[in-house]
Amino acid sequence: MSELPKLGISVKYNDSGSGLFKDAQSIPISYVREYVTDMLDSIALFEDLGGTGLVTSDHLAFEGGMSHPLTASYAIQQRLWLFLFTDYNSGPVTINIDTQGAKSLKKISKGSPAELEVGDIVNGTVYLCYYNALDDYFMIVSNLNESYSLTKNTSQVLNSGTSETDLHTYTIPANTLDGSSRTLQTKYAGSFTDATATCRLRAYIGGQLIYDSGVLTLGGTGSWEINLTLITTGSSTAKVIASLAANNFSTTLPNSVSSYFTSLSGMDWTTTNIVKITGTAAGATGGSNDISCEMSQISIQK
C-alpha cells in the first residue's frame, strides 16, 4: 500500500523518552484522521428522550451528509463524553450510541451513584460524562440540573367582567412533582387599575385552592405580587405557603401582605396538573380590565 500524502502541518514531538525534541516533522494524514475520529467519538447528539426517559441515537451527523458511527465499545473509544440533549428527561435514562449497548446514565446523590430523576436533564445543555467501565454505566460529572424554569411569561392578561377570570394558566408535565421534597415555586405580579372595585386574587393547583386573598378594598391603583412555594410530601400530598404584597391597600385585609399556609391531599403527581392564578373585580364599579397580570414565572427545585 502506498504511503498517504503528507499534510502541511509542522509539530515537534518527544523522541521516545530522550527528553529532547526533534526538528519539525510533517504528520501523515492517517494520524490526523485517527485523532479527529477520537474527538468525534466523544460527542453524541441525542434527539429522543421518550416517555420512560430512554435515550436512543444514531451517530453524529454533519453538514453535507458526512457521518462517523461509533465502532467499538465505550471504554475503548473514550472515557469522557460530551452529551448534548434536545429534551428534558422524564425519569431514569439509558444511553445507546450506535447500537453499542444501552447503559444507564447516573448522577451522584448523597455521595453514591443514583438514577436520574425527572428534570435532571435540561433541553439544550451540554453535559460532561464519565464512562465507568468497571460498573458499566455513564456518570454525569458536570451541569447536573438542580433547578430549572418551567415557564416564564411577560404578556399582559386582563380580567373579564365581574366573574372569576384565569389570569395565568400552566399545565405542569406528568411526574414533574412525583416523589417527596420536590419544590414548585411560582411568582405572579400585576396591577389593580380601578381603585373603586373590590378585587380578589386566588391560586389553584390540580383544581385545589392554594391561595385566596379574600375581598380586597383598595386605597388606590397600584401593583401586586403573589409568591407561592409548594413542597411535595408524598405521591399525593404537599404543603403550600403563599403570600400577597401590594402597595395600595386601604385597611388591614385578610391574607394580605401575610402568609397563607395550607396542606394538600388527594393529588396525583404522576399526571399533569394545572397551576393557575385568577382575578375577580366585583362591586358596584367592578368589571373588565380592573386587574392585570403582567408577569409570571414557575420553576422547579430538587
Image (cartoon, rainbow, N blue to C red):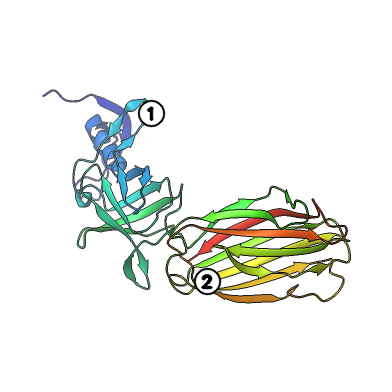
Nearest to the observer: residue 205 or residue 132: 205
Q: Nearer the viewer, mark 2 or mark 1?
A: 2
Side of 140 where 192 appears, left or right = right
Side of 298 where 191 appears, left or right = right
Residue 214 against residue 97 in the figure, above or below: below
For the point 32% across and 33% down, the residue is: 10
Kindly identify which residue carries mark 2. 231
Task: Say whether disc 2 or disc 1 marks the residue closer to the N-terminus.
Answer: 1
Kindly identify which residue carries mark 1. 63
Q: Report the label total.
A: 2
Under tag 1, what secondary structure?
helix
Residue 210 against residue 125 in the figure, above or below: below
The kind of residue on which mark 1 rests is: Glu
For the point 37% across and 42% down, the residue is: 47
Label 2 environment density (alpha carbons within 10 Å; few <14, some 14–19, many ≥20): many
Nearest to the observer: residue 244 or residue 194: 194
Q: State the separation of the CA atoms marked 2 and 1.
A: 46 Å
